[in-house]
């Protein structure tokens, strides 16, 4: 089922959160008791989620702001920012193609090739060196969202083990987190290039579980991407959706256990769950 459906459905799912990454938006939600809250802390069975031992964070967009990447790619396409969703969709599409066909190139290489494809289709002159610089240089220098450091520190202070899991290469994520000033906040930093399969393939999440020696129900996966949480939930992890600007959920999979506006709200929710 993974092979038959993911290739066609997931690129559409993935690109939804990229179209307007630089535009903030309000998240209006109201709890039944009349109090304002965007957090959802009940499972589908209306029971409190068990407190996780480990929290796994996606990196790109969940922790790091993609606005700089949007600007860089737009400039490479002669200012055609309207082509960004097409580029992003192609990049994610071909990451799945490589996973399902047994090939592997790192995320930067796939992003560069996808950008070249878009440029060629639109008649825009773009050499490989310029395309690579637009992707790799920008991807490795993305800043953290304003809530991230404080939220991670609060979660660490609450006793949770914090690790990251990304589709970026191992060298790439180490540079990303270092440049964003977040490296020391994570016990471990995992990359899919350790197994050469891209999320949301089940093996990517299982790799983390096996290395940490924990059970799926003891782990909370945090991401701003519905496709990432769908993959984690399929393996049995608890899931938390961070509603970054333009991020939306996919209705044909299980709902996340937690929905929050940022990492500070996640820290609030988990603090209450431990009491």
Image (tube, rainbow, N blue to C red):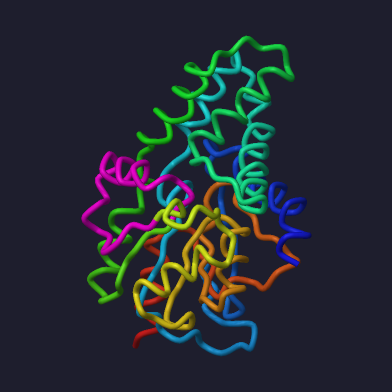
The one nearer the camera, 191 or 142, is: 191
Identity of the residue furthest to the top in this view: 125
Residue range in magenta is 166-190
Asked if 156 appears above or below 243 in the picture, the reply is: below
Residue drawn at x 66%, y 19% is: 119
Is 172 part of what is drawn in magenta?
yes
Quadrant housing residue 30? bottom right
| Residue 132 image point, x, y percent | 48, 24
Image quadrant holding the N terminus, namely bottom right
Residue drawn at x 55%, y 69% is: 232
Residue drawn at x 64%, y 72% is: 255
Quadrant housing residue 234? bottom right
Asked if 203 appears above or below 42 in the picture, the reply is: above
| Residue 199 image point, x, y percent | 55, 57
| Residue 201 image point, x, y percent | 59, 61
* Left or right relative to 173: residue 227: right
Image quadrant holding the C terminus, namely bottom left
């Amino acid at each position: 089922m993974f092979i038959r459906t993911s290739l066609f459905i997931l690129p559409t799912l993935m690109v939804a959160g990229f179209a307007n990454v630089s535009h903030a938006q309000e998240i209006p939600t109201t709890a039944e008791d009349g109090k304002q809250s965007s957090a959802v802390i009940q499972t589908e069975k209306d029971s409190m989620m068990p407190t996780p031992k480990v929290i796994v964070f996606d990196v790109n967009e969940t922790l790091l702001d993609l606005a700089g990447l949007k600007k860089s790619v737009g400039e490479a396409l002669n200012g055609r920012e309207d082509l960004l969703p097409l580029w992003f969709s192609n990049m994610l599409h071909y990451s799945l193609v490589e996973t399902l066909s047994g090939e592997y190139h790192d995320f930067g290489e796939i992003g560069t090739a996808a950008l070249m494809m878009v440029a060629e289709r639109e008649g825009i002159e773009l050499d490989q060196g310029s395309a690579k610089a637009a992707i790799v240089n920008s991807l490795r220098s993305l800043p953290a969202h304003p809530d991230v450091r404080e939220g991670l520190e609060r979660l660490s202070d609450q006793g949770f083990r914090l690790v990251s899991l990304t589709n970026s290469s191992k060298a790439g994520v180490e540079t990303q987190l270092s440049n964003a000033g977040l490296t020391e906040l994570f016990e471990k930093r995992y990359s899919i290039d350790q197994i050469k399969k891209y999320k949301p393939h089940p093996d990517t999440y299982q790799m983390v579980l096996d290395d940490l020696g924990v059970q799926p129900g003891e782990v909370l996966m945090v991401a701003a991407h519905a496709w990432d949480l769908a993959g984690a939930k399929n393996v049995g992890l608890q899931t938390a959706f961070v509603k970054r600007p333009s991020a939306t959920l996919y209705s044909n999979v299980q709902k996340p256990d937690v929905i929050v506006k940022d990492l500070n709200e996640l820290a609030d929710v988990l603090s209450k769950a431990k009491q």
